[in-house]
Amino acid sequence: MENKSLSKEELIAQLKALSEAEAPESIHMGAMCYSPAPPPLRKVKCESCGQLIEEFDWMSSRNGIKKQVEKIKALGYDAKVEHICADCINKLGITDEDGDAFTEGLYYVFYFKTKEQQEYNIVQCSDEDAYKAVLAFLKNEQSYTDYYDATHLIKDELDVIKKMTGISIE
Amino acid sequence: MKIAHLPKSVALELTYRCNHKCKFCSCPWDAPNSAYPKGEELTVCDWKKVVEVLYDKGVESFSISGGEVLLKDGFESILRFIRQEGGKRGLDLPIVLISNARKMNEDYIRLFKELNVHLSMSLPGYDTFQEHTGVDNADGVLHWFQVAKRLGLKTTLNVTVTKKNYGELFQTMSLGLINGADDVLLNRFLPGGRGLAHMDELMLTPTQVNGMLDVAEEVLSYANKQGNVGTEVPLCAIKDVEKYKHIHIGYQCAAAKGFFVIDPAGNIRTCNHSPHIVGHAFRKPMIEDIDYWNTFANSEYSPAMCSECAMIKKCDCGCREVANILHGSPKRIDSSIII
């Protein structure tokens, strides 16, 4: 192909020919300079209302959250986790860290109650390590190992555990 | 203080070496008077260990760059290893390989096809290619787009848009697509690396950034193709956000959230543009500068002047690393786009 000799009109004609020959491909990504990694944008169903939500599934931690909650349930606690949309989380009365309503995306919501608790403690949390801390606490362990293989003492995580379970520890 | 988990995508900069001298290059080790610690490059064996560690930490997709990746001895072996280890874990996402194509050959392209590599090749202007890169090879790049197309390999045309090639953007994008590129990635020139020495001659004005988007939309609509702008543009800098149907514009930074970078010596950075090392692939913990990592991972970097903006949750106010490079903090203004 003689690239230099093409006029703008000729370029347009060839571009239009491309449009007739090939179906468009949509590749979305966040702003990531020169690295067009495979699209992290995925359609995920809200586990509460069933709405399909397009979200940037950025992080690699999420699959582990449900496993941790299964382990908590296996200990006999009434616990569940839902991956739900902004509309559904707002209906629960949960706000973001700034006290604002959620506007888009999907969120992990953790429900927990002991036999003594009348109602669920409900919290939005996408940090798998927080679930690990709860699990270790409920198993009466002194520590847990986080994603980076660092060990954390449960006595240093009491605020997290209170937030996740509603259980206050003096 | 805890850090967020690693993003799912990583860019491995396999080598410092390059056979171009691009004026816009943002590799931090090539910045004027750079203090960036260029350590000894990891061996192929080291990189395989890195790949294993990353997979074990939940990383799912890999981009490969440099320097110029084709100059890294044994890069083919690293690619095969990524594919092999991914296969063990049920992962078959494309590996993105970013190259200037100067050392490309048909065997490589066949290998990329075999290993499900998505090839991204740089064409920073057609007439101005040599002026930007120091090398006369624009037709060579276009040739490899043709070959890739013929062999069924998916490709991205990667254009860094500068003041010098702004006037020929229509031609550059058109030639890339006509010669076989499947999609387009535009990056407005960002100050950093060697580019710091060429800011005046390369940096787009805000009007030109809008013009870049208009041209991209025009070309892509003719071809019925899609494209992306990979370097964040503040929403307030765009005159009419709604009119772009074919070019997807990034307003929020993906560094430490969507991807991160490992340099040729194994040092970890939040993005390819950043000169700030936050850790090392072989250390435990891998991320040592947790404050800096979390600034990006948690998007804790909005400039004060943007704090009251209604769009603050959808826009990162330009490139936060440019703010850091030019003004000493990611919380400052990205003056490459905001006046």
Image (cartoon, coloured by chain):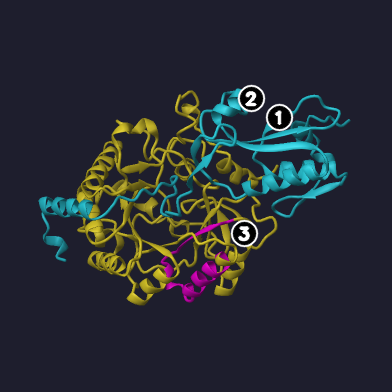
Chain colours: A cyan, B yellow
Which quarter shows the C terminus of chain A? top right
Disc number for residue B280: 3
Q: Which residue sits at x=58%, y=28%?
A: A88
Is label 3 in a helix, a strand or a loop? strand
Query: The disc labelled 2 sits on which kind of residue?
Result: Leu
Judge the density around disc 1: few (<14), some (14-19), many (≥20) Cα neighbours within 10 Å: many
Labels 2 and 1 touching (C-beta < 8 A): yes
Query: The disc labelled 1 sits on which kind of residue?
Result: Ile
Considering only vertical position in the picture, is B71 above or below B318? below
Labels 1 and 3 touching (C-beta < 8 A): no
**Disc 2 target residue:** A92
Q: Which residues are magenta?
A: B59-86
- What is the residue that sits farthest to the front in this orientation? A50
A154 and B328: which one is in front?
A: A154
Disc number for residue A122: 1
Q: Which residue sits at x=87%, y=46%?
A: A142
Q: Which residue sits at x=39%, y=47%?
A: B230
Q: Nearer the viewer, mark 1 or mark 3?
A: 1
